[in-house]
Image: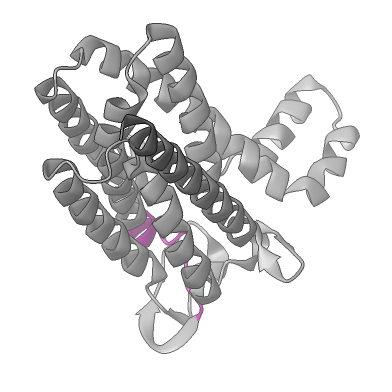
Amino acid sequence: MFPGFTLFGKFISSYVLCTLAGIFTACPLAIARYKKRGGNDVGMIFAFLFAALGCAVGMHILYGITNIRHWHILLKAADFGDFFTRVQVIFGGSVFYGGLIGGLIAGGISMKVQKLPFDITTDCAAPSIALFHGFGRIGCFLGGCCYGIEWEHGITYTNSLIESANGVARFPVQLCEAGFEFALFAALSVLLYKDKFKGKLLALYLLIYPVGRFLLEFLRGDEYRGSLFGLSTSQLISIAFFVGSSVFLIIKSLKKSNVRKETQ
Protein backbone atom coordinates (compact mmCIF):
# COMPACT_ATOMS: atom_id res chain seq x y z
CA MET A 1 0.00 0.00 0.00
CA PHE A 2 2.29 2.76 1.28
CA PRO A 3 5.08 1.38 3.49
CA GLY A 4 6.80 4.73 3.74
CA PHE A 5 8.97 7.24 1.96
CA THR A 6 12.57 8.39 1.82
CA LEU A 7 13.50 11.78 3.27
CA PHE A 8 17.07 13.07 3.17
CA GLY A 9 18.28 9.58 2.38
CA LYS A 10 16.49 7.98 5.34
CA PHE A 11 13.47 5.69 5.00
CA ILE A 12 10.48 6.88 7.04
CA SER A 13 8.05 4.08 7.85
CA SER A 14 4.30 4.72 7.62
CA TYR A 15 3.83 2.39 10.58
CA VAL A 16 6.19 4.46 12.71
CA LEU A 17 4.43 7.69 11.70
CA CYS A 18 1.02 6.23 12.59
CA THR A 19 2.38 4.95 15.89
CA LEU A 20 3.77 8.37 16.74
CA ALA A 21 0.44 9.95 15.79
CA GLY A 22 -1.24 7.50 18.17
CA ILE A 23 1.18 8.31 20.98
CA PHE A 24 0.87 12.09 20.63
CA THR A 25 -2.91 11.84 20.48
CA ALA A 26 -3.70 9.18 23.06
CA CYS A 27 -1.21 10.09 25.81
CA PRO A 28 -2.01 13.83 26.11
CA LEU A 29 -5.72 12.97 26.11
CA ALA A 30 -5.31 10.51 28.98
CA ILE A 31 -3.14 12.95 30.93
CA ALA A 32 -5.68 15.77 30.46
CA ARG A 33 -8.51 13.50 31.62
CA TYR A 34 -6.50 12.42 34.64
CA LYS A 35 -5.64 16.01 35.57
CA LYS A 36 -9.29 17.03 35.18
CA ARG A 37 -10.14 14.45 37.85
CA GLY A 38 -7.66 15.92 40.29
CA GLY A 39 -4.66 13.77 39.43
CA ASN A 40 -1.04 14.79 39.19
CA ASP A 41 -0.25 15.15 35.50
CA VAL A 42 3.49 14.75 36.10
CA GLY A 43 2.89 11.40 37.76
CA MET A 44 0.75 10.29 34.82
CA ILE A 45 3.48 11.37 32.38
CA PHE A 46 6.05 9.24 34.19
CA ALA A 47 3.63 6.31 34.27
CA PHE A 48 3.22 6.58 30.48
CA LEU A 49 6.98 6.86 29.94
CA PHE A 50 7.62 3.67 31.91
CA ALA A 51 4.69 1.98 30.19
CA ALA A 52 6.18 2.95 26.81
CA LEU A 53 9.52 1.37 27.77
CA GLY A 54 7.75 -1.78 28.92
CA CYS A 55 5.74 -1.80 25.72
CA ALA A 56 8.86 -1.51 23.55
CA VAL A 57 10.58 -4.38 25.37
CA GLY A 58 7.50 -6.60 25.63
CA MET A 59 6.50 -6.41 21.97
CA HIS A 60 9.94 -7.57 20.83
CA ILE A 61 10.22 -10.31 23.47
CA LEU A 62 6.90 -11.87 22.49
CA TYR A 63 7.83 -11.65 18.81
CA GLY A 64 11.02 -13.51 19.64
CA ILE A 65 9.07 -16.14 21.56
CA THR A 66 6.83 -16.74 18.54
CA ASN A 67 10.04 -17.37 16.59
CA ILE A 68 11.38 -19.86 19.11
CA ARG A 69 11.69 -22.49 16.37
CA HIS A 70 14.44 -20.36 14.82
CA TRP A 71 16.49 -19.82 17.98
CA HIS A 72 18.86 -22.59 16.94
CA ILE A 73 20.44 -20.24 14.39
CA LEU A 74 21.92 -18.26 17.29
CA LEU A 75 24.20 -21.21 18.05
CA LYS A 76 25.56 -21.08 14.50
CA ALA A 77 26.76 -17.46 14.70
CA ALA A 78 30.32 -16.99 13.45
CA ASP A 79 31.12 -14.10 15.80
CA PHE A 80 29.47 -11.58 18.12
CA GLY A 81 28.48 -9.30 15.23
CA ASP A 82 26.82 -12.20 13.45
CA PHE A 83 25.12 -13.25 16.69
CA PHE A 84 23.73 -9.74 17.19
CA THR A 85 22.44 -9.68 13.60
CA ARG A 86 20.63 -12.99 14.15
CA VAL A 87 19.12 -11.71 17.41
CA GLN A 88 17.77 -8.70 15.51
CA VAL A 89 16.15 -11.02 12.98
CA ILE A 90 14.49 -13.17 15.66
CA PHE A 91 13.41 -10.33 17.96
CA GLY A 92 13.19 -7.53 15.39
CA GLY A 93 9.43 -7.61 14.85
CA SER A 94 6.69 -6.64 17.28
CA VAL A 95 3.51 -8.17 18.69
CA PHE A 96 0.82 -5.93 20.19
CA TYR A 97 -0.03 -8.26 23.03
CA GLY A 98 3.63 -8.37 24.08
CA GLY A 99 3.67 -4.59 24.14
CA LEU A 100 0.40 -4.50 26.06
CA ILE A 101 1.66 -6.93 28.69
CA GLY A 102 4.99 -5.11 29.02
CA GLY A 103 3.27 -1.75 29.19
CA LEU A 104 0.80 -2.90 31.85
CA ILE A 105 3.57 -4.33 34.01
CA ALA A 106 5.89 -1.31 33.71
CA GLY A 107 3.05 1.18 34.04
CA GLY A 108 1.67 -0.70 37.05
CA ILE A 109 5.07 -0.63 38.77
CA SER A 110 5.36 3.11 38.12
CA MET A 111 1.88 3.69 39.55
CA LYS A 112 2.79 1.64 42.62
CA VAL A 113 6.05 3.50 43.22
CA GLN A 114 4.42 6.90 42.72
CA LYS A 115 1.38 5.84 44.75
CA LEU A 116 -1.00 6.95 42.02
CA PRO A 117 -4.69 6.08 42.55
CA PHE A 118 -5.20 2.84 40.62
CA ASP A 119 -8.87 3.31 39.72
CA ILE A 120 -8.62 6.83 38.33
CA THR A 121 -5.32 6.25 36.54
CA THR A 122 -6.39 3.09 34.75
CA ASP A 123 -9.84 4.50 33.92
CA CYS A 124 -8.22 7.46 32.15
CA ALA A 125 -5.66 5.27 30.41
CA ALA A 126 -8.05 2.60 29.09
CA PRO A 127 -9.68 4.60 26.25
CA SER A 128 -6.28 5.89 25.16
CA ILE A 129 -4.90 2.36 24.83
CA ALA A 130 -7.66 1.60 22.33
CA LEU A 131 -7.08 4.90 20.51
CA PHE A 132 -3.32 4.30 20.25
CA HIS A 133 -3.79 0.78 18.93
CA GLY A 134 -6.30 2.00 16.35
CA PHE A 135 -3.66 4.31 14.88
CA GLY A 136 -1.16 1.47 14.98
CA ARG A 137 -3.42 -0.81 12.96
CA ILE A 138 -3.78 1.87 10.29
CA GLY A 139 0.01 1.84 10.15
CA CYS A 140 -0.10 -1.94 9.72
CA PHE A 141 -2.51 -1.53 6.80
CA LEU A 142 -0.31 1.05 5.09
CA GLY A 143 2.85 -0.97 5.67
CA GLY A 144 1.36 -4.33 4.66
CA CYS A 145 2.08 -6.22 7.88
CA CYS A 146 -0.52 -8.16 9.91
CA TYR A 147 -2.24 -8.80 6.59
CA GLY A 148 -5.48 -10.67 6.03
CA ILE A 149 -6.48 -13.88 4.32
CA GLU A 150 -6.86 -14.10 0.56
CA TRP A 151 -10.13 -12.52 -0.60
CA GLU A 152 -11.12 -11.82 -4.19
CA HIS A 153 -12.63 -8.45 -3.27
CA GLY A 154 -9.68 -7.46 -1.11
CA ILE A 155 -6.68 -5.17 -1.52
CA THR A 156 -3.56 -6.30 -3.36
CA TYR A 157 -0.21 -5.19 -2.02
CA THR A 158 2.59 -4.69 -4.51
CA ASN A 159 5.30 -3.04 -2.43
CA SER A 160 4.85 -4.36 1.11
CA LEU A 161 8.11 -4.89 2.98
CA ILE A 162 6.78 -8.38 3.80
CA GLU A 163 7.08 -10.31 0.55
CA SER A 164 4.40 -12.88 1.42
CA ALA A 165 1.79 -10.10 1.54
CA ASN A 166 2.35 -9.02 -2.05
CA GLY A 167 0.60 -10.07 -5.24
CA VAL A 168 -2.57 -11.48 -3.65
CA ALA A 169 -5.90 -9.75 -2.98
CA ARG A 170 -6.29 -9.77 0.80
CA PHE A 171 -9.02 -8.94 3.29
CA PRO A 172 -8.20 -5.60 5.05
CA VAL A 173 -8.30 -7.08 8.53
CA GLN A 174 -6.08 -4.28 9.85
CA LEU A 175 -8.75 -1.68 9.06
CA CYS A 176 -11.41 -3.85 10.70
CA GLU A 177 -9.37 -3.98 13.89
CA ALA A 178 -8.66 -0.25 13.71
CA GLY A 179 -12.41 0.43 13.45
CA PHE A 180 -13.06 -1.93 16.35
CA GLU A 181 -10.46 -0.12 18.48
CA PHE A 182 -11.87 3.33 17.65
CA ALA A 183 -15.34 2.08 18.59
CA LEU A 184 -13.94 0.80 21.88
CA PHE A 185 -12.25 4.16 22.44
CA ALA A 186 -15.57 5.96 21.92
CA ALA A 187 -17.50 3.59 24.20
CA LEU A 188 -14.94 3.73 27.01
CA SER A 189 -14.74 7.53 26.69
CA VAL A 190 -18.52 7.78 27.16
CA LEU A 191 -18.38 5.54 30.22
CA LEU A 192 -15.51 7.60 31.64
CA TYR A 193 -17.41 10.85 31.01
CA LYS A 194 -20.53 9.47 32.73
CA ASP A 195 -18.51 8.01 35.62
CA LYS A 196 -19.72 4.50 34.88
CA PHE A 197 -17.78 1.34 35.79
CA LYS A 198 -15.38 3.30 38.01
CA GLY A 199 -12.12 1.45 38.47
CA LYS A 200 -13.16 -1.15 35.91
CA LEU A 201 -12.62 0.47 32.51
CA LEU A 202 -9.22 -1.10 31.91
CA ALA A 203 -10.57 -4.51 32.86
CA LEU A 204 -13.54 -3.86 30.59
CA TYR A 205 -11.18 -3.10 27.71
CA LEU A 206 -9.19 -6.25 28.46
CA LEU A 207 -12.47 -8.18 28.45
CA ILE A 208 -13.94 -6.85 25.20
CA TYR A 209 -10.87 -6.39 23.03
CA PRO A 210 -9.73 -10.04 23.35
CA VAL A 211 -13.13 -11.21 22.04
CA GLY A 212 -12.81 -9.08 18.93
CA ARG A 213 -9.15 -10.00 18.50
CA PHE A 214 -9.88 -13.72 18.87
CA LEU A 215 -12.44 -13.54 16.06
CA LEU A 216 -10.37 -11.29 13.81
CA GLU A 217 -7.45 -13.71 14.05
CA PHE A 218 -9.39 -16.11 11.83
CA LEU A 219 -9.18 -13.45 9.11
CA ARG A 220 -5.41 -13.06 9.42
CA GLY A 221 -3.22 -14.51 6.68
CA ASP A 222 0.21 -14.07 8.28
CA GLU A 223 0.49 -17.57 9.68
CA TYR A 224 4.22 -17.25 10.45
CA ARG A 225 3.39 -15.74 13.88
CA GLY A 226 3.17 -19.09 15.60
CA SER A 227 0.32 -21.30 16.80
CA LEU A 228 -0.51 -23.94 19.38
CA PHE A 229 -3.46 -26.36 19.56
CA GLY A 230 -4.75 -24.90 16.28
CA LEU A 231 -4.94 -21.38 17.74
CA SER A 232 -2.61 -18.47 17.11
CA THR A 233 -0.43 -17.03 19.87
CA SER A 234 -2.70 -13.98 20.03
CA GLN A 235 -5.82 -16.13 20.36
CA LEU A 236 -4.33 -17.98 23.31
CA ILE A 237 -3.38 -14.70 24.96
CA SER A 238 -6.87 -13.37 24.21
CA ILE A 239 -8.37 -16.27 26.14
CA ALA A 240 -6.04 -15.61 29.07
CA PHE A 241 -6.92 -11.90 29.16
CA PHE A 242 -10.64 -12.63 28.88
CA VAL A 243 -10.55 -15.09 31.77
CA GLY A 244 -8.33 -12.86 33.91
CA SER A 245 -10.50 -9.77 33.32
CA SER A 246 -13.67 -11.74 34.03
CA VAL A 247 -12.27 -12.96 37.36
CA PHE A 248 -11.14 -9.42 38.26
CA LEU A 249 -14.55 -7.91 37.50
CA ILE A 250 -16.38 -10.66 39.43
CA ILE A 251 -14.15 -10.19 42.48
CA LYS A 252 -14.52 -6.42 42.25
CA SER A 253 -18.33 -6.74 42.12
CA LEU A 254 -18.41 -9.17 45.05
CA LYS A 255 -16.30 -6.83 47.18
CA LYS A 256 -18.59 -3.91 46.33
CA SER A 257 -21.63 -6.02 47.20
CA ASN A 258 -20.12 -7.03 50.57
CA VAL A 259 -19.33 -3.39 51.40
CA ARG A 260 -22.95 -2.45 50.71
CA LYS A 261 -24.21 -5.20 52.99
CA GLU A 262 -21.88 -4.10 55.80
CA THR A 263 -23.07 -0.50 55.58
CA GLN A 264 -26.76 -1.40 55.68
Please indicate whether residue 85 sits to the left or right of residue 173 in the image: right
Outermost residue on the bottom side: it is: 152
Q: Nearer the viewer, residue 257 or 24?
A: 257
Residue 8 seen: no
Q: Nearer the viewer, residue 46 or 62?
A: 46
Residues in magenta, as a range: 140-149
Please indicate whether residue 148 sits to the left or right of residue 32 in the image: right
Residue at horizontal 27 percent and vertical 56 percent from the top:
184
Q: Is residue 34 above or below residue 69?
A: above
Q: Is residue 228 above or below residue 85?
A: below
Q: Is residue 147 magenta?
A: yes
* Quarter of the image where the N terminus is located: bottom left
* Quarter of the image where the C terminus is located: top left
Q: Position of residue 210 (x, y in %)?
A: 48, 58
Q: How many marks?
A: 0
Q: Position of residue 194 (x, y in %)?
A: 12, 45
Which quarter of the picture shows residue 25? top left
Magenta residues: mostly which secondary structure? Answer: loop
Residue 164 seen: yes
Q: Is residue 169 magenta?
A: no
Residue at horizontal 31 percent and vertical 48 percent from the top:
130
Outermost residue on the front side: it is: 264
Q: Position of residue 189 (x, y in %)?
A: 18, 47
Q: Position of residue 165 (x, y in %)?
A: 51, 69
